[in-house]
Image (cartoon, rainbow, N blue to C red):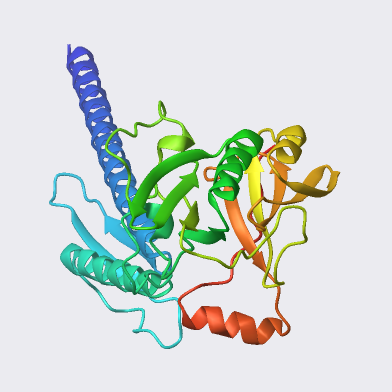
Amino acid sequence: KQFCILLCLIKRYIRSCSQKRHSTQLVKQEGTILQKRQRNSKMKVILYLSLLTNCLAFTTLSRVVPHQQTSTTTTLFQTSSNDLPSDVTTTRRTLLQNTLTTATTAAAAAVAFLPNQAEAAVGTLPEYATSNAILQGITVDVADKSQQDEMIAFLSNSFDFKILRRRVTGSVTDTWMGFGPEQLSIPSDFEIPVSSFAKYGGHASIHIRYDSKSLSPLYKRGEDAPGDNIAYLQVGVPTYRISAMVKNGGNVLDAYGIVNVVSPSGLPMRGIVGIMPDPIMFVAINCKNVKESKAFYEQLGFMEQEYPYARP
C-alpha cells in the first residue's frame, strides 16, 4: 500500500514537470514569433527610409520579454565623419522629418539643373518652350505676274506646297505657301494620333510678293541665283518631281540623290527625300566669318541646334 502511494506521487511529479516544460516551450515559441514579426516590420520601415534618403543607415535594437511590454530603441548612425555621433537616439517622427528634409533638398538641387526657360513669347507649342526666336518664313519678290504664277506652280507641282492664304493690298499681291498652319499653337481640329503633321501648328512658309508697279526685276528666268547671301532653302518631302521643276521655270543644277534647283523667282532650293513634321527644314546662309555671324543671330534670340534629319 505504501509502495502504491509512492508510485502515484512519482507519476504526479513527472506529469507536473512535463506540463511546466511544455508551457515554457510555448512561451518561448510565442516570444520568438512575436520578436520575428516585430523585427520584420521594423526592417521594412528601415528599408523604405533608406531608399528615400540613400545616404543614411538605420538599425533597430529590440529586446522581447515574454508576457511583458516590448520596448524598442531606434538608433540613427551617420555615415560621414562630419555628421552627428552614433549614439543619437531619435523618435520615428524625427526620422520622418529628417527624411522629408533630405528629399526636399534633393528636389531643390535637381530643379537648379533644369534648362532655362525661354524669355520671349513665341507661342504655346511645346516644341518652342525653350526657344526665344524662330524662323517663321522667307519672303521672295517676283518681277511680274507671269513669274508669280510660275513660282506658285513650281512649288505646288514640284514639292507639293499648298497655298495657305492670299492678300491683295493696292498694287501688291501677297501669297503664302507652305505645308500646314502657321499659328504658334495647337489647332483646335488637331487630334492625336488621328491628324497628320500637315494639321499641326508652327509651320514655316514662303511669302511670294508681287508689286505691279515695280519696274526693276530682280531675277530673269534661266539665270543664276541673284546675290550670294542665301545658299539654299532645304525642303524634305516624300517625293519631288524634276520634270515639273523644268516645266515651271526651274533651273536644275544637279540631281544626285538630292536636287539643287534655282526657282523661277531666283530662290535657290535643295530637295531631299524624307518625312518631316514641317518639310521646310532650314535656310542655309553664306557668311565670311562663322563666329561673327553666329554671335549676330544669337543676339536676335536664335540658338545653335543639331542638324535636322528627315526620316526616310
Give how far across and how far down residue 201 sits, in percent: 39, 46
Residue under the image location 30 percent in, 35 percent down: 29
Give how far across and how far down residue 266 sits, in percent: 67, 58
Residue 183 seen: no
Give how far across and how far down residue 207 sits, in percent: 48, 55
Q: In this view, does 107 lie to the left or right of 215?
A: left
Q: In which quarter of the image is residue 186?
A: top left
Give how far across and how far down residue 245 sits, in percent: 72, 40
As displayed, is residue 277 above or below residue 141? Answer: above
- The residue lying toward the viewer, choosing from 95 and 52, is 52
Q: Is residue 128 left or right of residue 233?
A: left
Residue under the image location 14 percent in, 44 percent down: 67
As displayed, is residue 42 above or below residue 97? Answer: above
Quarter placement of the C terminus:
top right
Residue under the image location 35 percent in, 84 percent down: 85
Residue under the image location 40 percent in, 73 percent down: 116
- The residue lying toward the viewer, choosing from 288 and 37, is 288
- The residue lying toward the viewer, choosing from 218 and 132, is 218
As displayed, is residue 227 above or below residue 159? Answer: below
As displayed, is residue 99 above or below residue 82? Answer: above
